[in-house]
Image (cartoon, rainbow, N blue to C red):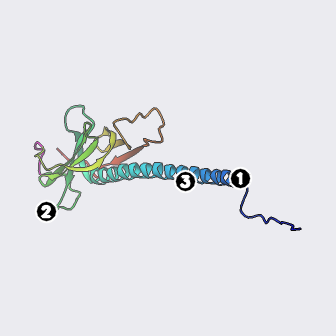
Amino acid sequence: MFNLVMEREGFTLTELIVAVSLLEIVVVAVAGIDLASRRSLLLASRRARVQDEVRYAMEHMVRNIRLGNKIRPTSGTDLTNVWVRVDRDVDGYPQNSPDNTNDDTWVRYDFIAADYEIKYVPPQTDEPDVLPGTEVPIAKDIYNLDFDIVDQLFLTIDLTAAYDPSTYNPSTVDPNNPGVTLHAGVTLRCKAKD
């Protein structure tokens, strides 16, 4: 008689179901880790962009205001726009001669709330109306800008920027819309004689 010995080839259905289930668990775990790391990277890049924007704007304003010898709001009590008078020599370099204001120039910073940006008006010889096209945007995504003129030689600047300033709410923490606020105190070089 013939003894038939069957050799086993392949996997049973149960073994295949267990293997596929284990593989599925591993893939879901790896995908979850990947999605979490991508989200974390996105949020970190948003915050870094906002920090860079607000830091650059603050450095620009502090550098130019520090050279000034007089500061005043552009109109009345509007402390989101400011003129700064800077004493410069004939080559345009800052100097310290408070008695002579004939060679002084004026720079201006405007916070355009509707556009969420800060514009800079480069040095002008007097305080004319700003000519169209002379304003240079220096920062976007700005939520708020306040100047507090403490006295004729000192002011503080509060600057807040957000990833999406149109939906930003400073009283809540939203990781999808990070906000950054910087504060600076600036002392002018000298007081000009009017």
Tell which of 147 and 173 is nearer to you. 173
Asked whether residue 49 is in view, the answer is yes
Q: Helix or strand or loop: what does disc 1 sit on?
A: helix
The CA span between labels 2 and 1 is 91 Å
Task: Report x, y in % for residue 137.
Answer: 23, 49
Q: Would residue 1 appear left or right of 68 to someone viewing this image?
A: right
Q: What residue is rendered at 29% in x and 41% in y?
A: 116
**Quadrant holding the N terminus:** bottom right
* Mark 3 residue type: Asp
Question: Does dot 2 land on a helix, a strand or a loop?
Answer: loop
Amino acid carrying mark 1 in the image: Leu
Whole-number angstrom distance, CA of label 3 to CA of label 1: 31 Å
User: Which residue position is annotated with label 2?
Assistant: 90
Q: Residues within 10 Å of mark 1 (few under 14, many from 20)?
A: few
Q: Position of residue 22 (x, y in %)?
A: 68, 53
Location of the C terminus (image quadrant)? top left
Q: Which residues are magenta?
A: 125-129
Label 3: few (<14), some or many (≥20) within 10 Å?
few
Q: Could you tell whether 52 is left or right of 74 in the image?
A: right
Residue tagged by mark 3?
34
- Category of crowding for the residue at label 2, using alpha-carbon neighbours closer than 10 angstroms: few (below 14), some (14–19), many (at least 20): few
Counting residues from the start of the chain, the first of labels 3 and 1 encountered is 1
- The answer to whether the residues at label 2 and label 1 have Cβ atoms under 8 Å apart is no
At 38% from the left and 53% from the top, the residue drawn is: 52
Image-based side of 170 in relation to 99, left or right: right
